Amino acid sequence: MLLAVNVSAANNMYQIEKIKQFYGERAGKRALAWRKLIQKSQHLTEPQKLKAVNDFFNQFVFISDQKLWGKEDYWATPYEFIGAGGGDCEDFSIAKYKTLLKLGIDDNKLRLVYVKALELNQFHMVVTYYPTPSAIPFVLDNLNGEILPASQRKDLLPIYSFNGSKLWLMKQKGQGQVAGNASRLSLWNDLRNRSQNIKLNRPRHTF
């Protein structure tokens, strides 16, 4: 058990140092703050974990993929998002989702959801959390920092959602219909491969 803890700690320090070397001193400080968040939040209740993670990442800067990565659509890993210090809605959501998994929240309770933000008239991504399988989910969002039930987010129209294993077509505010495996999403597959190898790409800007 002690060996496993030591290996985990060493791995964490390796990740922090790699982010620092690749993106700079400020990025290293953000990575260290992320690790401290994970350490301090392990024993919180699940609602408290949601708030801690949502508040932490909502401090980051919103910037489009085109300006940051020079691409029309790019899903950054949490390492890249923390390294750059900013990103678009997918990057906010992916970082929150991956961090909540690290805090022990079951993948079956979490989904990444593509929605249409009606007031902005544009596509958007959020994280949802289901306390129970049949419950109305809570929404973690970088547009609205308050974690609210989906039934209170009339400004969001769900389109499809996915987690580590499944892809759903959404039906209003409900659970939706299983539409296949999340592996259908090529950007998701690419992100998972980069996450496993801690492969970092250099953005045009850092914050």
Image (spheres, rainbow, N blue to C red):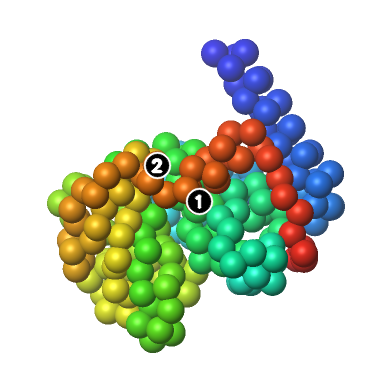
The crowding category of the residue bearing disc 1, from other C-alpha atoms within 10 Å (few below 14, some 14 to 19, many at least 20), is some
Dot 2 lies on which element? helix
The image quadrant where one finds the N terminus is top right
The percent coordinates of residue 66 (x first, y second) are 65, 70
The image quadrant where one finds the C terminus is bottom right
**Disc 2: which residue:** 183
Q: Which residue does the image show at 49% across and 43% down from the upper left?
A: 189
Q: Is residue 119 left or right of residue 152?
A: right
Displayed quadrant of residue 10: top right
Q: Which residue does the image show at 69% across and 66% down from the upper left?
A: 70
The percent coordinates of residue 193 (x first, y second) are 56, 37
Q: Where 69 falls versus 164 (above or below)?
A: below
Relative to the observer, which residue lies in front, 161 or 126? 161
Q: Which residue does the image show at 43% across and 84% down from the upper left?
A: 120
Res 136 seen here: no
The crowding category of the residue bearing disc 2, from other C-alpha atoms within 10 Å (few below 14, some 14 to 19, many at least 20), is some
Res 21 seen here: yes
The percent coordinates of residue 30 (x first, y second) are 71, 53
Q: Is residue 185 left or right of residue 32?
A: left
Q: Which residue does the image show at 39% across and 55% down from the upper left?
A: 112
- Type of amino acid under label 1: Leu
Q: Where 193 falls versus 65 (above or below)?
A: above
**Disc 1: which residue:** 187
Dot 1 lies on which element? helix
Q: CA distance from mark 1 to mark 2?
A: 9 Å
Displayed quadrant of residue 195: top right
Numbered badge on residue 92: none
Q: Where 43 falls versus 57 (above or below)?
A: above
- Type of amino acid under label 2: Ser
The percent coordinates of residue 45 (x first, y second) are 38, 46
Relative to the observer, which residue lies in front, 62 or 42? 62
Q: Are marks 1 and 2 in contact (CB under 8 Å)?
A: no
